[in-house]
Image (cartoon, rainbow, N blue to C red):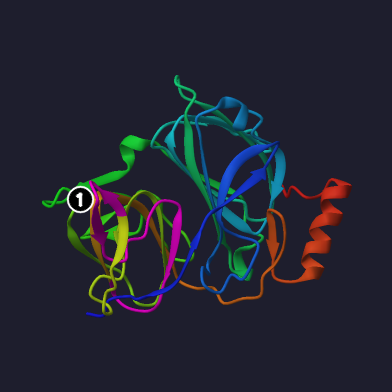
Amino acid sequence: MTIRPIKQTSISQPTLEGAGVKLNRVFGFGDTSLSDPFLLLDDFRNNKKEDYINGFPWHPHRGIETITYILKGNVEHGDSLGNVGTLKTGDVQWMTAGSGILHQEMPKGNEKGEMHGFQLWANLPSSLKMTSPNYQDIPSNEIKEIHDDDGSIIRIIIGNYRGYSGPVKGISSDPIYLDIFIPANKIKTIPIEVNKNVLAYIFEGSANFEYASKPQGVMVEKMINGQEVKIQDMTGNRTLINFDRGDEIKIKTSSDGVRFLLIGGTPIQEPVAWHGPIVMNTNEELMQAMKELNNGTFIKK
């Protein structure tokens, strides 16, 4: 077994999106080689309604899939095909935009005004970019949750973990999408297929994600009563980790434990041409999509 070393780390950046929603962009609109088949990941978490209530009004998508995962609050959604609904705490929506769809997503928060969720964009291969739009709406109680003996909790949105499968099916890039909590001061190994590009996004606590894959350094975390409290190479909140090749990741958690998204997929390795939420393979295809938006033929029957 080969532990995946870290290829690159980065910190999500504050961004305004939609009609003024404050969020943190984890990655997107840049070099896609590290994340292929994924294009973008946004972390939207706010405790003030004015930071998210204007939402994401009507906008188009083509050539991609969007995966929305809600941790706190509600999101109302609707589209040009007549679909409407509300994503609630713990729910997932996997939307295949395919040939094109117009939709809106309007965060409402919870009774405390809290809103927290993630949206991931997955690319579609050229052979599927003009497929018919499709939804997979998964309520929280249908997502398999594994409780390991060490106190870890793994929610399986898509893919497999120790023989258990997530409820999302039929996705071309054969992805994995896990929500993982590991308690304080634990060492855990998670197997993962060697042919996938894999990333982790930490949103609570911290951990060492290269444990045992190379000699570890030591850094000062903080001073307590005049004493240095040291941890080994811990990576914390709002950090994205892109892993190199290997068939497992090994993690040592801090005294706070850690919670993170573990996402992986088989690279598509095709040219990417995009304009906002429309992602094709060539600039000519983008120009065609813009033309169809303008003349009213974007939505295919």
User: Which residue is the extreme one toward the left?
Assistant: 149
What residue sits right under mark 1 in the picture?
184
Q: Position of residue 196 (x, y in %)?
A: 41, 72
The image quadrant of residue 65 is bottom right
Which amino acid type is shown beneath numbered disc 1?
Ala
Where does the N terminus fall, quadrant-wise?
bottom left
Give the secondary structure at mark 1: loop
> Which residue lies most toward the front here?
226
Q: Residue at x 46, y 24 (%)?
A: 110
Please say whether residue 69 is one of the residues in the magenta stretch.
no
Residue 52 can be seen in this image: no
Residue 9 to residue 107: above or below: below
245 displayed left or right of 59: left
In the foreground, 256 or 138:
256
Residue at screen point 61% across, 39% down: 22
Question: Percent x, y for residue 180?
Answer: 30, 51
The answer to whether residue 278 is above or below residue 111 is: below
Range of magenta residues: 222-248
